[in-house]
Image (tube, rainbow, N blue to C red):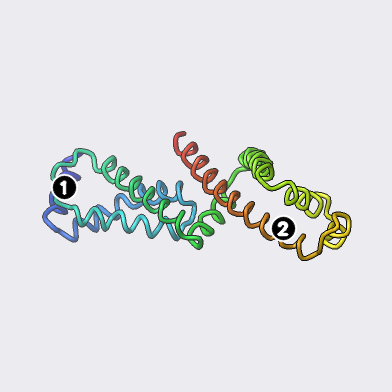
Amino acid sequence: MNQAERQMLMAVAEADEKAFTSLYNQYFATVYPFVLGYLKSPDMAEDVSQEIFVKVWQDRERLRDVRCFKAYVLVIAKNQTLNYLRKIFRTKALLAEVLHHYQRNVAADDHKVISKEYQDHLQRALRQLSPTSKLIFQRCREEKRSYDEVAEEMGISKHAIKKHMVRTMKTLRIMLERLDVHLCLLTTFFKNLH
């Protein structure tokens, strides 16, 4: 760390707001792309990056002992981002936004891997269904037959077919949402290792 940066950190530690603004301006361009690499959403990355600098300000007295601010702030960024990802998993709207941005940023090769992963996951999920639900799903979705046709063939009501399909689709949606999160994290973490 050069002398000017050392002096800036000491000034921030003493609650010098002008020095903090300089520190923020110098390192925001390092923190924001790092966070964006995990979250994919520019709005979320902006918010988390702001939170990171709020934390730096709140814990500014620690800056006296910091030997490399870039490493220090990136550790905070990693921890804040992982905490935010945990929060996302508990909030459907936030999860939907991350997945939306993630899917727009996935490379073509990644789509092939993800498609295979989805198919494998779907087959595992289907194996967990009851034999009746599995058969109804296969006939209605994979063979693209109407509820009326399947109901007549199986000798049960159209309402029963619909009930099975609603339950099956809900189960599959939950399992695939978990897979989306899993793939999002794995792909993001692997990309950030390069």
**Residue at disc 1, secondary structure:** helix
Structural crowding at the residue carrying mark 2, measured as other residues with C-alpha within 10 Å and reported as few (<14), some (14–19) or many (≥20): some
For image coordinates 46% across by 39% down, the residue present is: 189
For image coordinates 26% across by 58% down, the residue present is: 54
Quarter of the view holding residue 119: top right
Viewer-closest of 148 and 94: 148
Quarter of the view holding residue 159: bottom right
Q: Amino acid at mark 1?
A: Arg
Q: Amino acid at mark 2?
A: His
Viewer-closest of 36 and 117: 117
Residue 22 image point, x, y percent: 24, 55
For image coordinates 19% across by 60% down, the residue present is: 18
User: Disc 1 and disc 2: Cα gap in Å?
Assistant: 59 Å
Mark 1 or mark 2: which is in front?
2
In the picture of the structure, the residue carrying the numbered disc 1 is 62
Q: Is residue 147 above or below residue 39?
A: below
Q: Extreme bottom residue here?
A: 159
Q: Is residue 94 left or right of residue 22?
A: right
For image coordinates 82% across by 60% down, the residue present is: 156
**Residue at disc 2, secondary structure:** helix
Query: In the rendered structure, which disc, 1 or 2, sits on the residue that comes first in sequence?
Result: 1
Structural crowding at the residue carrying mark 1, measured as other residues with C-alpha within 10 Å and reported as few (<14), some (14–19) or many (≥20): some
In the picture of the structure, the residue carrying the numbered disc 2 is 164
Residue 84 image point, x, y percent: 39, 53
